[in-house]
Amino acid sequence: SRFRVKVSSLCHRALAWALRLVRGKVCVRSIHAFVFSNCTHGKADSVLETFDLYAGTHPSFCISPQTAEAVDEVVRRVRPSRVLELGMHCGYTSVRLLRLLPPAGRLITVEQDPLTAELGEEIILVSGFKHTQFQVLTSSSAEAIQTLHSHLEPDKETNLLALETEQLLSPSGCSVLLIHREQRAEEIRGVLDHIRERVDCFCIESELQFMTEISYRKENTRTDK
Ligand SMILES: C[S@@+](CC[C@H](N)C(=O)[O-])C[C@H]1O[C@@H](n2cnc3c(N)ncnc32)[C@H](O)[C@@H]1O
């Protein structure tokens, strides 16, 4: 009977794993609880390591190590002082970004699910960042973009194009990272097809499996690559 219990628990775990994989859904509460209780408070690197530890046993969670490294590489190269993140989830990428910003840098991160926004914000604070360095907006990206700048028509556009319409993409140049999951590949392809037609101002700098780096420049300074 001990054998039966073991087999049934194994089946249970296999089922939970398969479900997570199929649904791509991650329980925000359990990530938050794990990170909160296992990291060293005040240390961003420890928070990231704890996230990575969790990701090791929860394959559908969070961006891959390759994508994480690619994000770091872009931030180190572009050296932004202001970053807008659309879709914060538990704050993993927010913490990655914040630790690379200059002291006066600022992150605005948007999350539409109120519980996720609350828990993600707590993780950013636990990492040692202050509200002077970041702001969490609990709303949809479309609504957030409207509040970041005046009047955006409620719309059918992608967030990227809405950012352009709202003149939130700096005409002298800025970088956009599209980080996505497999399930959204179709949607991303549509956005990229559009981007490819806009050679006057958009340029795809690099494409990884789950991340695309796009640069934007409106002024007549773009030299074709
Ligand atoms: C794949 S996760 C983002 C991962 C996160 N950037 C990270 O690296 O840890 C997507 C998140 O975006 C949020 N989200 C999805 N659609 C949104 C929208 N239209 N506006 C704001 N947040 C959205 C979801 O609630 C979810 O928490």
Image (cartoon, rainbow, N blue to C red):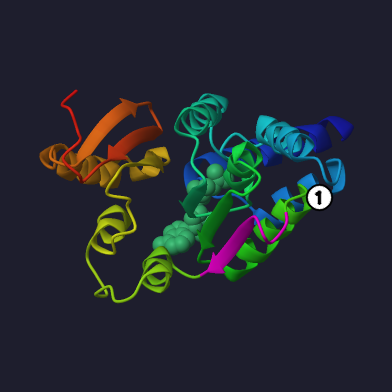
Q: Indicate left or right for 144 with 4 as reference.
A: left
Query: Which x, y percent locates residue 147?
Result: 42, 73
- Asked if residue 19 shows in the view, the reply is no
Q: Indicate left or right for 143 with 138 as reference.
A: left
* Viewer-proximal residue among 183 and 217: 217
Q: Indicate left or right for 129 with 145 as reference.
A: right
Query: Which x, y percent locates residue 30?
Result: 73, 52
Q: Is residue 203 magenta?
A: no
Q: Is residue 134 magenta?
A: yes
**Residue 164 quadrant:** bottom left
Chain part drawn in magenta:
130-138
Q: Amino acid at mark 1?
A: Phe
* Viewer-proximal residue among 129 and 102: 102
Q: Residues within 10 Å of mark 1 (few under 14, many from 20)?
A: some
Q: Residue at x 62, y 57 (%)?
A: 134
Q: Residue at x 28, y 61 (%)?
A: 162
Q: Indicate left or right for 36 with 124 as reference.
A: right
* Viewer-proximal residue among 67 and 27: 67
Query: Which x, y percent locates residue 212?
Result: 35, 34
**Residue 39 quadrant:** top right
- Asked if residue 77 shows in the view, the reply is yes
State the residue position of label 1.
36
Query: Which x, y percent locates residue 55?
Result: 66, 35
Q: How many marks?
A: 1
Q: Is mark 1 within 8 Å of ligand 1?
A: no
Figure quadrant of the C terminus: top left
Figure quadrant of the N terminus: top right
Q: Residue at x 56, y 53 (%)?
A: 107
Q: Residue at x 49, y 70 (%)?
A: 139
109, above or below 201, in the image? below
Q: Secondary structure at mark 1?
A: helix
